[in-house]
Image (cartoon, rainbow, N blue to C red):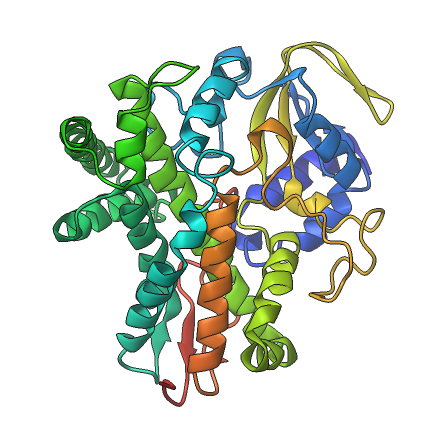
């Protein structure tokens, strides 16, 4: 394949007209595992090479090291008003902030926090399904997969129940900024987005101060009062971390649930199996993370030194695009990679990344998706797609349907 056709292929991957099915393009891209697109960027599309680079200390996540402008991905906050979250930092600062955040989120300090949310998550899922209303034409994104994760994050952080509706509104606005509508006035959108960021920041700052004075049993209280070997978080660091949990965690889980239900509706035999045996939700979600990952690309990482890979020297200062969705369907790593097969014995996917920047919220996202899909399978009577393919979101990095119109014959109790 010529250099010109490869460049055209990259443009096609980012072209919205291919959003509904980018996988044939990924297969073409894998024919050149490490590709230079001529502007200082390198695209890596095969499993073992991506995984190696995700673990390579010579690859930086800090945008200040980047020589190539224009990140097609997303940041969880406006860096003009907040410091970068730890996913956009390198060691040792990344490690310090991640350790501190993890101390109130998971093992070894808080090993049961996610497990203890199980009952509350079930309650939220049941309430959303009970409130679906019209079953002849419902948008699963609007009615279920969008409100579920943001409600969970509110409970995790400790947002008072009476303030959850305000939090939902801010989340809606910030999410829309990641997925602009065609023809939308960017100046007006940016103005609305900045206002939402400011209001959210002021609200969280006030909540942090209140929790420092009167701690409760929630994650924000623990982070606000943390005093450990790594010191304590500043208010700005805590605001940045809370914004990361809200935006990055929410958006990826919306896509995981929506992509999951779409895939199950396209594979009714697997949907029936899940309806009969809810425990199959565990391998189904793992296979979904391989087959239809909510994050398709890891854009604009930077090389801190020359790196030789697959006979290509990626020079110091280059921008790296790691196409994890292409790696997840690499036939050199997975048998029959384009088949949705929850029974495959080895699903070492890249759906949550790998290495020091592997998805911080993976345990929660897994549990949310398992509960969501198993309950939807159990309670929706004869669900079916009304539109296939559905309308997809504009974002090439966070790929998932903007709407998922379905119908069913009723809701089981």
Point 19% across, 51% down: residue: 164
Vertical order, 272 against 204 (above or below): below
- Nearer to us in this view, 229 or 19: 229
Which quadrant of the view contains residue 76? top left
**Which image quadrant for residue 33?**
top right
Q: Is the N terminus in the top left, top right, bottom left or bottom right quadrant?
A: top right
Residue nearer the viewer, 229 or 247 = 229
Viewer-proximal residue among 203 and 113: 113
Q: Is residue 78 visible?
A: no
Taking 65 as reference, is 222 left or right?
left
| Left or right: where 413 falls relative to 170 | right
Residue 297 at x, y percent in the picture: 58, 39
Q: Which residue is rendered at x = 42% and y = 81% of the image? A: 379
In the depicted view, which residue is nearer to us: 32 or 251?
A: 251
Residue 235, x across and y down, in percent = 25, 20
Q: Is residue 286 above or below residue 360?
A: below
Looking at the image, residue 84 sits to the left or right of residue 234; the answer is right
Q: Up-down: is 85 above or below 21?
A: above
Residue 143 placement (x, y as % from top left): 31, 67
Image point 34% across, 41% down: which residue? 246
Residue 215 x %, y %: 20, 33
Q: Is residue 316 visible?
A: yes
Q: How many marks?
A: 0
Q: Quadrant of the C terminus?
A: bottom left
């Amino acid at each position: 394949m010529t250099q010109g056709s490869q460049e055209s292929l990259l443009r096609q991957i980012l072209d919205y007209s291919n959003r509904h099915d980018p996988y044939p393009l990924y297969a073409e891209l894998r024919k050149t595992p490490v590709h230079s697109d001529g502007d200082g960027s390198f695209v890596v599309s095969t499993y073992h090479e991506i995984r190696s680079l995700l673990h390579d200390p010579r690859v930086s996540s800090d945008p200040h090291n980047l020589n190539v402008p224009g990140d097609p991905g997303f940041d969880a906050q406006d860096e003009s008003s907040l410091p970068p979250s730890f996913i956009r930092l390198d060691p040792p600062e990344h490690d310090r902030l991640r350790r501190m955040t993890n101390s109130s989120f998971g093992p070894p300090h808080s090993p049961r926090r996610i497990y203890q949310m199980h009952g509350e998550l079930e309650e939220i899922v049941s309430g959303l399904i009970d409130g679906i209303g019209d079953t002849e034409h419902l948008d699963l994104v609007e009615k279920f997969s969008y409100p579920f994760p943001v409600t969970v994050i509110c409970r995790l952080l400790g947002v008072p129940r009476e303030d959850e509706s305000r939090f939902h509104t801010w989340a809606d606005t910030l999410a829309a900024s990641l997925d602009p509508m065609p023809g939308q006035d960017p100046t007006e959108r940016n103005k609305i987005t900045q206002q939402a960021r400011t209001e959210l920041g002021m609200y969280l700052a006030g909540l942090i101060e209140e929790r420092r004075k009167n701690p409760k049993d929630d994650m924000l209280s623990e982070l606000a009062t943390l005093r450990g070997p790594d010191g304590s978080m500043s208010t700005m660091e805590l605001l940045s971390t809370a914004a990361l949990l809200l935006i990055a965690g929410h958006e990826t889980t919306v896509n995981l649930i929506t992509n999951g239900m779409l895939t199950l509706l396209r594979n009714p035999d697997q949907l029936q199996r899940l309806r009969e045996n809810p425990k199959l939700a565990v391998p189904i979600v793992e296979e979904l993370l391989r087959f239809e990952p909510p994050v398709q690309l890891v854009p604009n990482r930077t090389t801190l030194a020359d790196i030789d890979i697959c006979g290509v020297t990626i020079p110091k200062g280059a921008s790296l695009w790691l196409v994890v969705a292409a790696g997840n369907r690499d036939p050199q790593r997975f048998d029959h990679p384009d088949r949705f097969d929850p029974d495959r014995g080895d699903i070492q996917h890249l759906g949550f990344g790998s290495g020091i920047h592997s998805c911080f919220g993976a345990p929660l996202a897994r549990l949310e998706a398992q509960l969501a899909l198993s309950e939807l399978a159990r309670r929706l009577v004869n669900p079916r797609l009304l539109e296939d393919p559905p309308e997809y979101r504009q974002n090439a990095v966070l790929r998932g349907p903007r709407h998922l119109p379905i119908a069913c014959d009723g809701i089981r109790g």
